Amino acid sequence: LVNSMYDCWLRYKLCDEKVLDGYKDYFNYIVVKSNDRVISNAANELKKALSDIKDVDIEIIGNMPESNCIFIGTLDDFKAEGFDIDLNNELENEGFALKTLEKNNRKIMAIIGGSGKGVLYGAFHLIRSIFGGRALEDALCIDNPQNAFRILNHWDNMDGNIERGYAGKSIFFKDNRMVQDLSRIKDYARLLASIAINGVVINNVNVHQQETKLITDEFLPDVKRIADVFRDYGIKTYLSINFASPVEIGGLSTADPLDDEVKNWWKDVASKIYSYIPDFGGFLVKADSEFRPGPFTYGRNHADGANMLAEALKPYGGIVIWRTFVYNCMVDWRDRSTDRAKAAYDNFKPLDGKFMDNVVLQIKNGPMDFQIREPITPLFGAMEKTNVFMEFQITQEYTGQQKHLCYLVPLWKEALDFDTFAKGEGSFVKKVVNGSLFGAKYGGIVAVANIGDSKSWTGHPLAQSNLFGFGRLAWNPDLSSREIAEEWIKLTFGCDKEVLETVVPMLLESREIYEEYTSPLGIGWMVNPGHHYGPNVDGYEYSHWGTYHYADFKGIGVDRTVATGTGYTAQYKEPVAKMYENIDTCPDELLLFFHHVPYDHKLKSGKTVIQHIYDTHFEGVERAEKLRESWTKLKGKIDDEIFKAVLERLDIQVVDAKEWRDVVNTYFYRKTGIKDEHGRKIYE
Ligand code: GCU
């Protein structure tokens, strides 16, 4: 099991030898007729994977042999070779088909791609099938991505630090320069290609002084080198840019998006970037958000800002990804009318239809900020004439910082499966973000990456499941959390029954467990300010960030109703708006997000709010302890290094869960004076 922590799900140990029988007949040659570099990498990956199997000796060749083989290429490659393949026009650009064919008494396994990328994804599908123990008949398919854009955002700074990074330092930057040895980046590209990620933004959305220069001749040669590595694995490179660049590095006196000099400055920048990187993806922009510069300074709006950049990128096919994480972060906490949850909608809904067609709005799943439980941002149901991407956070900023186990796929699925009712029942968020509901030109799913230079990439080895899960879900949001978990476990740890039966429930329950011992009923926050780790119930209560729970001795929760509160519920379409507005139909898990209630308010579960808080905090700790206990039973069945690394973190999780429990329970006991019905220990 050497290196398995580093290899993640690409460790190529057979899960179930028996399934090999079906495949083995074809393992003599990999035939590649194309000289596309992505397709050659597909062949290299296949060879690398299959060569790890005992008694398999496979060669890559350029012509059809006399014997059985695997033939990989685009549909055109197959046609040129005389194959008459009918895929009913089902194959899309980045999709693939895995088929078995016969010709002149030879058996051929065909990986047919809609493009080079499709071939690469097909190769990895075959690899996942073989090593994940899927029989050949079950692996044969035509499969297309449901989202055209599947992008990772890296919040990496050029000094090597990663904002909200919990897995070491940047793999891209060090000491204010790009790294020179690109071998780790190449390994990363392989890892991402294996889950069909097709875009990376390599620098933080907060673009500081040094990163502002990434779009200049000083650093573009380095960005190009990175882009060259990613391109060969079907991945486009993007940069986060500083909206004030014309002033900060361009010597102009303004960054006003309607100023001709500014417009021309950006056009020159675009032309320069594309001279280095002809397939450059585009810009990611955090503007007028958390003290970042933007069009507001010049009395312009987001559409003015985004369109100006979009115009510069348009001739080259680039896109502007403009974030909607825009809110007033200088609120007076006594002001109860300003509601941060409303901000994205209030800022962007009026601009629907005003963006150029190569602008995409990137919207966080929740209206606040990646909490363990939030409703879905209502903006998803509201932008009928604008391209939108979903933004998830894989890095566990508010979900345990890769010390706690928190498998996030269930949370993401909840968001994607949410019905906006924008065009009647069935208007799911996943249909909005893939572009199909409103007929948008671009659609996709983006996430903030959780990787760094730690040996396991993700710090917590089990957090690899989140990176894997994100890629799989972005490809196909209809996969279930369990399917994804099982596939990841099989590829990472093998098919041992006990391992599966232990780790699957650990993953599937982990989000709920984390939620139980942290902030209750959708209220969020309650963390230490700044670094966001550990309990601090009032940590953000009297601050300017707009993140409050409003707990006093009588009650808790934010009244976001139209009737008596901030009116946020009105941003949803009916019947969703009514469901949240009405305290009787508002789901328990989001009660305190939408309503301010007395502590003896009865939940649908029959418990009072205060008793629910006590119960979940005790239960959350017990369940965290069980996670640890379950894992200890796997000693000897899991690579020792991984076993220990996970155990160390589960130890921390148990200790810190107790701290959460005690801090939260004591806080509410002191506020309310109400005792726990079961007389458990609450510190006074
Ligand atoms: C959160 C996070 C910041 C990040 C911001 C963003 O507030 O704490 O580190 O910059 O989100 O998404 O822009």
Image (tube, helix red, strand yellow):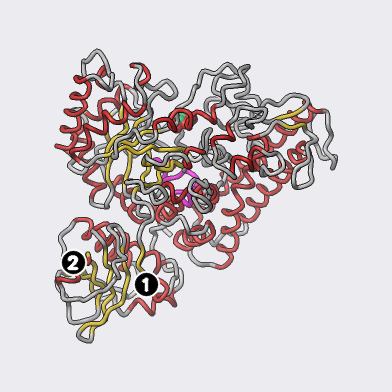
Question: In the displayed structure, would residue 345 be above or below residue 636?
Answer: above
Disc 1 or 2, which lies upstream in sequence? 2
Give the residue displayed 45% in from the left and 31% down from the top.
Answer: 325
Task: Report the residue at 43% width, 60% height from top.
Answer: 1
Q: Are marks 1 and 2 in contact (CB under 8 Å)?
A: no
Left or right of 71: which side holds 134? right
Q: Farthest top residue?
A: 253
* Residue 460 is a magenta residue: yes
Circle 2 residue: 76
Q: Residue 220 location, x and y as percent?
A: 20, 33
Residue 104 vs residue 6, the one in the foreground:
104
Q: Residues within 10 Å of mark 1 (few under 14, many from 20)?
A: some
Real-space Cα separation, disc 1 to disc 2, in angstroms: 20 Å
The image shows residue 305 at horizontal and vertical percentages of 31, 26
Task: Choose between 673 and 629: the one closer to the eye.
Answer: 673
Q: Furthest residue to the bottom?
A: 105
Q: Which mark is residue 304?
A: none
Circle 1 sits in a helix, a strand or a loop, which is it?
A: loop
User: Amino acid under label 2?
Assistant: Asp
Bounds of the magenta segment:
448-467
In front of the other: 462 or 601: 601
Question: Would you say 126 lies left or right of 405 here?
Answer: left
Mark 1 against mark 2, which lies toward the viewer?
Answer: 2
197 relative position to 221: left or right: right
Q: Judge whether residue 462 can be spotted in this image.
A: no
* Residue type marked 1: Leu
Is label 2 in a helix, a strand or a loop? helix
> Is 581 covered by the magenta stretch?
no
According to the picture, the residue beneath numbered tag 1 turns out to be 140
Using the rendered image of the protein, determine whether residue 634 is visible from the camera's viewpoint. yes
Task: Please name the predominant secondary structure of the magenta segment in the image.
Answer: loop
